[in-house]
Amino acid sequence: MIAGLDHVAIPIANVEEMLAFYEALGFVVRRGERLHSIHFGNNRLNFHAPALWNDERFTLRGPTARPGCGDFCFVWQGTVESIARHLGKLKIEIIEGPAPREGGRNGGKVTGTSVYVRDPDGNLLEFMTYGETSPCTSECDAGGSSTTGRQGWAGGGVGRERMRRAAPALGRTP
């Protein structure tokens, strides 16, 4: 029986830039010689450095994978406003969103709200919130407010209203 996902691996081109980018986002970064990784929760994303993925003896990888081939969705604990502020502080451009998306929870029956960015190698990163929140810290809400107990993003007028309020933080018109 499949119990979960442990790790995924991708080739990368810009080692130091990629590691700095993910560290700034809040991932735990582990550096190696030819294999690096980022950790979040009980999951890991392995980064194969050029010295590894260009080695013809290294066959335990997707044979056609090249830097920029990844598409990952990370669950953000907090509001879409808080991820927008966090990305804004890091000067990371949101290329799409917020947008309702079907997530992986409950067999794909739960809708979340996502924003999309690209990392230095061009991989697509999706940050999805399911409306859960935790007490805000300085990095998620400079105003110190918390939305614990509010209805999630999916469905109803509350979701649309929260998307409208988030628009200015995302550089969009409501």
Image (cartoon, rainbow, N blue to C red):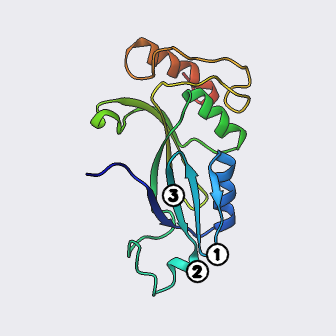
Tag 3–tag 2 contact (CB < 8 Å): no
Residue 72 image point, x, y percent: 46, 50
Instruction: Sort mark 1 into few (<14), some (14-19) or many (20+) by Cα contacts within 10 Å.
Output: few
The answer, for residue 136, to whether it is visible in the render is yes
Camera-near label (1 vs 2) is 1
The alpha-carbon separation of the residues under discs 1 and 2 comes to 9 Å
At mark 1, the secondary structure is: loop
Q: Which of the pair 163/83 is nearer the observer?
A: 83
Per the image, the residue denoted by label 1 is 33
The amino acid type of the residue labelled 1 equals Glu
At mark 3, the secondary structure is: strand
Total numbered circles:
3
The alpha-carbon separation of the residues under discs 1 and 3 comes to 16 Å
Tag 1–tag 2 contact (CB < 8 Å): yes
The amino acid type of the residue labelled 2 equals Ala
Residue 45 has which mark? 3
Q: Who comes first in sequence, dot 1 or dot 3?
A: 1
Q: Who comes first in sequence, dot 1 or dot 2?
A: 1
Per the image, the residue denoted by label 2 is 51
The amino acid type of the residue labelled 3 equals Leu
Q: Who comes first in sequence, dot 3 or dot 2?
A: 3
